[in-house]
Amino acid sequence: EMKKTGFPENFLWGSASAAYQIEGGYLDGGKGMTNWDTFVRIPGKTYKETTGDVAVDHYHRYKEDIALMAEMGLKTYRFSIAWARIYPQGTGDINEEGITFYQNIIDECLKYGIEPMVTIYHWDLPQALVDAYGGWESPQIISDYVNYAKTLFRYYGNKVKYWITMNEQNIFTSLGWLTAQHPPGKFDDQKMFYQVNHHAFMAHAKAVLAYREMGGTGLIGASFAYTPSYALDCRPENAMAKYNYDDLKNFWWMDVYAYGRYPKAAMAYLKEKGIAPVMQDGDQELLKQAAAAISFMGVNYYQSCVCEYNPMDGVTPYGTMNTTGVKGSAQEIGIPGIYNNPANPYLKTTDWDWSIDPDGLRYCCREITSRYALPIIISENGLGAFDQKTEENEIHDDYRIHYLKEHIRALEEAVTEGCEVLAYCTWSFTDLLSWLNGYQKRYGFVYVDREEADGGSMNRYKKDSFYWYQKVIQNNGL
Ligand code: BG6
């Protein structure tokens, strides 16, 4: 008997990017300054002081890039819109040049039959809104975000059927208000962290409802950076640590998107600590309405983690494991008394110490399917690595092929087990800027000739993985 692919016929094989990481042209076309344009200018914030001022020049080369996507056979391209190109001041007058730029990108995709998937917010916030009221720290952000989102629905709603309201709200808020690695660079401000998240949830919810009110019939949802967890072992305190972690680090976001409510145990814990978010009358009702109106759970999956009990004194009673925490930009060392994230001795790691765990992707899909019964869009998955271009301009990234192959295999298992997965987007199509790791941490199918310092030809070169993914798409994952 012939082997069949587990993926549905109309499965969307895709790839993803984000405006700040790919476009460059940071002052072109009437764009306003953003929080990131400001943040990267503070000495010591990014690797070798790298900025996205020029990025990989997609702003001027999008036609070449989208032609490469077409050559590969991509079914969907997920990209984000820079709020400050549409509204240079965050609100007020619309910048027609910005509207046209994304209209062109959308049209260029459609010309080749590539489904545009739009992320409304991928971390670049108009600086004017930060200056005016502290950006996400103020509830004023909600109406400005909704106004911006409605503008996108109005201009692009007839051509774009896939909308992602927020990219990794859990990450931009954690790195912005807990670890100080992203703007606004605040450290351990837990109260504000939860408040900012509540504002972002309300912005998401009101945008979803506005989309439906405007007659939007496409698919809309948020993308969550899902790091699934495994208990270190069957010691009950470790099982409970996993539960604590999931409530505070995963369900805190996904339950709000999918059910419109915060996990009870986590909320009780925050109340006890005096860091629960302040909500307005009617907020909870709106969150519930929006939850009923979303179409999918967006998942960015890179790695899994391990949970163990974390005693208040910070010393684990189980001496053999690494209890210093998993290294890596999105990792934390846990909360005393609640949980800790030791390394997983069964998994290999990337050059940036992120665990490599294809089965974790299957785990994510299974959890979402049984907990929320929602369709799933894998909006990011990929391997950041140091790629080498040979003198023949070839890039032999067999490690990336291996990584993606194993993850697609795990995804196929999830599909076979009944998970409704609509799309799989790799991160990323071309190489692009890694927020904190410069241009040396490469994710693309297409190599871009540029280093940290500006310069380099910006020429595009297809990696071995380009030809491999082309075949994956042709064979629908077989
Ligand atoms: C996700 C983001 O967190 O992971 C992307 O949505 C990001 O914007 C990607 O680039 C990879 O992270 P990093 O730190 O390796 O660039």
Image (tube, rainbow, N blue to C red):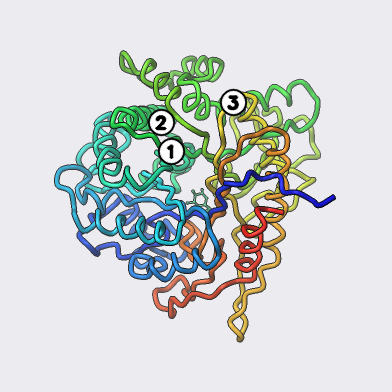
Q: As shown in the figure, which amino acid type bears the numbered disc 3?
A: Ala
Specify which label sits upstream in the sequence, 1 or 2.
1
Specify which label sits upstream in the sequence, 3 or 2.
2
Q: As shown in the figure, which amino acid type bears the numbered disc 2?
A: Asn
Tell me whether circle 3 and circle 1 mark residues in contact (CB < 8 Å): no
The disc placed on residue 373 is 3
- The front one of 414 and 203 is 414
Residue 84: where, in percent of width, then height?
A: 26, 51
Q: Residue at x 52, y 61 (%)?
A: 429
Q: Residues within 10 Å of mark 2 (few under 14, many from 20)?
A: many
3 vs 2, front mark: 3
3 vs 1, front mark: 3
Residue, disc 2: 197
The disc placed on residue 173 is 1
- The front one of 468 and 402 is 468
Q: Is residue 81 above or below residue 229?
A: below
The disc placed on residue 202 is none
Residue 282: where, in percent of width, then height?
A: 32, 14
Residue 115: where, in percent of width, then height?
A: 45, 51
